[in-house]
Image: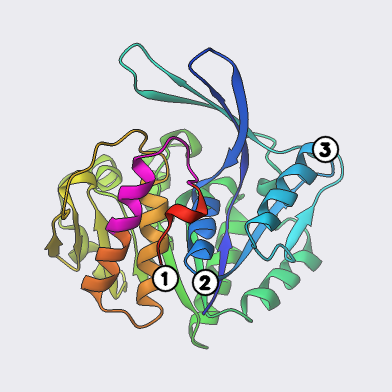
Amino acid sequence: MRLAAIGECMLEMRADASGNFRLAYGGDVFNTAVYARYLGVDVSFVSALGDDYYSDWLRERWQAHELDCSCLRVLPGATPALYIIRNDAAGERVFHYWRDASPFRRLLDDDAFRDTVQAFLATHDGVYLSGITLALLPEARRRWLLDVLSALRTRGLRVAFDSNYRPALWQNAEEARQWLDAGWAVADVALPSADDERLLHGEADVADRLRALGVAEVVLKNGAAGCAVNGARYAVPAPVQAVDATAAGDSFNAAYLASRWRDGTVPEAVAAAQRLAAVVVQHPGALVDRALVVP
């Protein structure tokens, strides 16, 4: 199984108990890519960076995770996007983003690099992307990417998509609904969250709606309430004391896809996904130590 993950990775600043900030990194698709690699999947990370110190710093860390970074666009003069995490008075995490000039927004601006990306994706068995991937790209580039994925699916490529709806990245909810539906329409596996679906569509039947768009396998994540696959519900086997929910869904997606795309059954994939997500939420930050991840 060779998986290409298309998305952004940002610098992360998080305050510790003494108020000092620690530098880290993360991003929704990137987190899933790392966890899939931890589980033995051959993963390529398709993204963009600048040519500054921190871009080099990020690339070194991506490669340390054993991600294939050979389809990386380097933009002279660009710097990575940044987010800061703080906790509010109630202890909830609050995110502040600086990503308007993110190099990823220009990933597909160059004709020659678009050809490179298309040829590169054709060498893979699967592609994973999210609504954040689409939201960060200009409209014409979103359309190009979805058209390429649709064409490659006719040759056997499998596509997995998570909406990861972030209202601040879209002009309005209607624009988000339009483009996320376009993402679902090229997906073999849909990995939405119940919270995102409620924000965008209310309490409609998610499985029926996405299957009407052509998705064969709809995996609806609902946190501690478990998940549902094509409407069949799976409870969380044993509650855990969550420390940080960052990357819970990203890690779930990685383990689910790693299992299913190795011919695991749906119950086996759900069990693997719930097991990994339970480990991740018991530790601070998006990425836990690799030794804690059991294939």
Q: Amino acid at mark 1?
A: Ala
**Residue depicted at x 48% and y 46%:** 288
Q: Is residue 182 visible?
A: no
**Residue depicted at x 16% and y 55%:** 237
Q: Vertically, is 292 above or below 20?
A: below
Q: Amino acid at mark 3?
A: Tyr
* Badge 2: residue crowd in 10 Å (few <14, some 14–19, many ≥20): many
* Badge 1: residue crowd in 10 Å (few <14, some 14–19, many ≥20): many
Q: Is residue 117 left or right of residue 171?
A: right
Cβ–Cβ under 8 Å for marks 2 and 3: no
Q: Earlier in the sequence, mark 3 or mark 1?
A: 3
Q: Is residue 203 visible?
A: yes
The residue under label 2 is: 41
Q: Amino acid at mark 2?
A: Val
Q: Is residue 49 left or right of residue 206?
A: right
Nearer mark to the viewer, of 2 and 3: 2
Rendered location of residue 111, percent (x, y):
78, 65
Cβ–Cβ under 8 Å for marks 2 and 1: yes
Task: Classify residue 227 by image quadrant.
Answer: bottom left
Task: Describe the element under mark 2 as helix, strand or loop.
Answer: loop
Rendered location of residue 274, percent (x, y):
27, 57
Rendered location of residue 257, percent (x, y):
39, 69
In the displayed orientation, state which residue is furthest to the front. 291
Q: Which mark is residue 258?
A: 1
Question: Label 3, label 1: how many angstroms apart (C-alpha)?
Answer: 33 Å
* Badge 3: residue crowd in 10 Å (few <14, some 14–19, many ≥20): few
Task: Describe the element under mark 1 as helix, strand or loop.
Answer: helix
- Which residues fall within the magenta stretch? 274-288
Q: Nearer the viewer, residue 227 or 40?
A: 40
